[in-house]
Amino acid sequence: MFDQRRISSTYSMNTGSVVGMATFFPLDTVRSRLQLDEKRESKNTLAVMMELVQEEGFSTLYRGIVPVLQSLCVSNFVYFYTFHGLKSINGEKSRSAGKDLILASIAGIVNVLTTTPLWVANTRLKMSGLKSKSTSYNGILDGLIKISRSEGIGALWNGTLPSLILVINPALQMATYEALKRRFKGVQLSALNYFVMAAISKAVATVLTYPLQLIQTKLRHGHNYKQLHRDAGTLDLILYILRIYGPMGLYRGMEAKILQTVMTAALMFSAYEKITGLVFKMLLNNTKIAH
């Protein structure tokens, strides 16, 4: 019964996540371009979106969406299956915000070490529109092979350090979300309630961790700073951006990121709660029938 519930919970979250990412994917494209294309003026999200359409066509907003959704499914499955598994081992009675944060962090570390190569390949695929990148990739597998051959196997784990630190993002999100749910324990919540709680939890996590997300993207893709050596690490990039662009340079593209992640997370969690509730009810009815 437990395994069925854990698997159904994971698939429910995956469904909501895929729907959310597919719906708001153009916002993620804008965010990536602003983070990596230093020459592009940092305008509002809609203005950048219109510029991309005029320069490269409407399809550029959805470049790389299929491999991103494929990787998202793998990543979410690893993360949420691990998280729910750890919650079950820990037991429902001993639940607290602190323990949820620890369990979510462990699940995040497992996810980062397992799926980082997929996201490195995805970043390259999504940014193939940048003129500074001449290598073309035909899907995730082709990207993984070409990157490992030209840059070495280690390049597939570029950005792992900020990614490991960034496990605090979903950890903060899950801990905040679970804390909000506990405040309304015993209350019948609507899809809108779940939507708002998920939006709040993701907004908090995104604002607190965005500078590291920007550095993570630059490490995965490769930075374009001529004055900085190609193998610059996390600290090198942070100090360089602060020196040249100031503190706001670490928040370039955050508007699009906030819109995309908050709306995606809100849609994902509201879909997850409703789908999970339906699946659990079906499993419970099947159990009663069996007995």
Image (tube, helix red, strand yellow):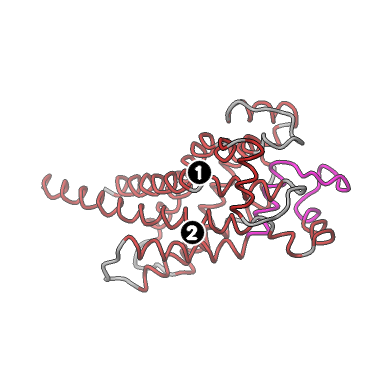
Question: Disc 1 or 2, which lies upstream in sequence?
Answer: 1
Under mark 2, the amino acid is Leu
Q: Position of residue 250 (x, y in %)?
A: 72, 59
Q: Answer with the quarter of the image where residue 77 lies.
A: top left
Residue 69 magenta-highlighted:
no
Residue 108: x and y in percent read 54, 52
Residue at 65%, 45% in the rendered image:
51
Category of crowding for the residue at label 1, using alpha-carbon neighbours closer than 10 angstroms: few (below 14), some (14–19), many (at least 20): many
State which region is magenta.
Answer: 210-237
Answer left or right for 103 relative to 1. right
Label 1 to label 2, Cα distance in Å?
16 Å
The numbered dot on residue 221 is: none
Drawn side of residue 283 relative to residue 174, left or right: left
Residue drawn at (70%, 32%) of the image = 153
Task: Name the mark on residue 103.
Answer: 2
Three-letter residue code for mark 1: Ser
Farthest right residue?
227
Apparent side of residue 78 relative to residue 117 in the rendered image (left or right): left
Asked if marks 1 and 2 touch (Cβ < 8 Å), the reply is no
Query: Which element is circle 1 on?
Result: helix
Q: Which mark is residue 75?
A: 1
Please tell me in which quadrant of the rendered image residue 186 appears: bottom left
- Whether 213 is among the magenta residues is yes
